Image: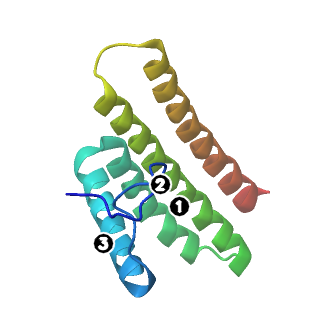
Amino acid sequence: MQPPENSSPQESPFKGKTGLRRIWNAFKYSLAGLRAAFRHEDAFRQECLLAAILVPIALLLPLSGPDKALLIACVLLVLVVELMNSAVEAVVDRVSLERHRLAKRAKDIGSAAVLIALLNLAAVWALVIFG
C-alpha cells in the first residue's frame, strides 16, 4: 500500500480519514484491540472477570452516585492500564525477542503501572466502603 502523497514523513501514512469515517474506523479498531487483548492476554481476561464481578457489586452497594462512579472508574482504570501494558509488550516483542535490558525495563515498568492501578483499586474500594 502506497502512502498518500500529502503525508508527512513524520506521520503515519495510513492516517487520513476524517469526520464520521474516522470515528467509525477508530471504533472498529478499538473493538479489534479489545478482541485481541481478550484472546491473547491472560491478565486482561482475569481483570475482565474482576470487572464483571466488581462493577455489579458497585452498582448494588448502598452508596451515592459519585461513590459508585469512583468505584467503577477504578475498575476501568485497571483495564486501561492493562491494555497499555499489553500494547507495550507487543511492540517490544515485535522489535526483538532477544533479551535486552531496555526491553526488560519497558516490560517491568508496564507491569508496575498495572500493579499501581490494582493497589489504587484496592485502596479506593476500601476507603469508600469502610472509610
Q: Is residue 127 above or below residue 22?
A: above
Res 28 label: 3
- The residue wearing badge 1 is 76
51 lies left or right of 73:
left
Alpha carbon separation for disc pair 3 and 1: 20 Å
Alpha carbon separation for disc pair 2 and 1: 5 Å
- The residue wearing badge 2 is 79
| Nearest to N terminus: mark 3 or mark 1 | 3
Q: Nearer the viewer, mark 3 or mark 1?
A: 3
Give the position of the N terminus as an image quadrant: bottom left
Q: Residue furthest bottom?
A: 20
Q: Amino acid at mark 2?
A: Leu
Q: Secondary structure at mark 1?
A: helix
122 lies left or right of 81:
right
Q: Residue furthest right?
A: 131
Identify the residue shown where x is 33% and y is 29%: 95
Nearest to the observer: residue 88 or residue 74: 88
> How busy is the neighbourhood of tag 2: few (under 14 within 10 Å), some, or many (20 plus)?
many
95 lies left or right of 51:
left
Q: Are marks 2 and 1 in contact (CB under 8 Å)?
A: yes
Q: Position of residue 105 (x, y in %)?
A: 51, 21
Q: Position of residue 130 (x, y in %)?
A: 74, 57
Alpha carbon separation for disc pair 2 and 3: 19 Å
